[in-house]
Image (cartoon, rainbow, N blue to C red):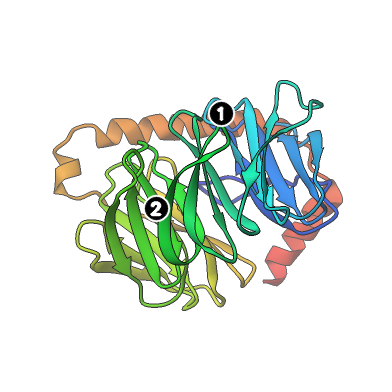
Amino acid sequence: MLRNGETGDWIGTFEGHKGAVWSCCLDANALFSASGSADFTAKLWDALTGDEKHSFEHKHIVRACAFSEDTHLLLTGGFEKILRIFDLNRPDAPPREVGNSSGSIRTVAWLHGDQTILSSCTDSGGVRLWDARSGKIVQTLETKSPVTSAEVSRDGRYITTADGSSVKFWDANHFGLVKGYNMPCNTESASLEPKLGNIFIAGGEDMWVHVFDFHTGEQIGCNKGHHGPVHCVRFSPGGESYASGSEDGTIRIWQTNPPNHEENHSGTGNAQTGKLKASTDEVTRKIEGFHINKERKAEEKQKIANA
């Protein structure tokens, strides 16, 4: 589903998969969407109309997908233990395959201007960094438990990982461990605030969304409301809110704490917020043409009313 990030309003549904959807993402301009599914396909969608643009066939479940920074490539990984790179300018061309992973692929991401690929596996610890051109591993970030979440910060400085009951921050350029903190429970996902990088969030088995100080690891907030384990947390691009997805079948959007005194004196916070709001409004206007099945929309409204 595509929803308005500020209000949570349902905009439309991408219909076409015949199996569970394990992963979905938007490109940098929110013009296209991609999804990976248990139906052995990854699909490319027009995010403005909802139309399916292309279906990329695989031989097993697709667990993760990610657009390159320049939006020309789509990276996929899954139960086949193979990373595939599809050229979106030539969608019918065979994909380029990168290496053989040690296990089923759980997460994928791009960094270093699309020169490096990041991946982690479901049944072995560590994050592997691959040279996108040579297809060889250039570095492995060692962890005791399998990495369930890996995020590259918006400024490209850090890689945030969650493994077991630990959240770690790695130098994305030199690959050293910068900080590592033990969490209150087994943690499924973590995300670093993209604007100032002074806080991070984490969610997992205890059904809560925890907020921590990046520099000290001290918990400074805790959001309760989910009724099942939290499987994914992510900040919005501007850092003014963050979302959490849970096994209880809901996605919740939380407001980040009010800016601290340093932001208030910077003189730039309001301008950036206004720019983000204008950008959001522009995208909202563009997606008014999204194809929505009227019956599905009625069913959605009825479900909300019943809830």
Asked whether 258 or 36 is in front, the reply is: 36
Q: Earlier in the sequence, mark 2 or mark 1?
A: 1
Task: Name the quarter where the C terminus is drawn.
Answer: bottom right
Q: Is residue 87 above or below residue 41?
A: above
Occupied quadrant, residue 154: top left
Left or right of 200 on screen, residue 107: right
Amino acid type, label 1: Arg
Between 192 and 4, the residue placed more toward the observer is 192
Note whether residue 235 is visible: no
Residue 103 horizontal/vertical position (percent): 63, 59
Instruction: Read off the residue under disc 2.
Output: 160
Q: Residue at x 46, y 28 (%)?
A: 113
Q: Is residue 44 visible?
A: yes
Q: Residue at x 25, y 51 (%)?
A: 198
For mark 1, does the 10 Å Cα neighbourhood hold few (<14), some (14 to 19), or many (20 or more) residues? few
Q: Quadrant of residue 218?
A: bottom left
Q: Nearer the viewer, residue 287 or 77?
A: 77
Q: Residue at x 63, y 43 (%)?
A: 99
Amino acid type, callout 2: Thr
Residue that carries the numbered disc 1 in the rendered image: 133
In this view, the mark in front (2 or 1): 1
Q: Position of residue 61 (x, y in %)?
A: 76, 55
Q: Is residue 284 left or right of residue 204?
A: right
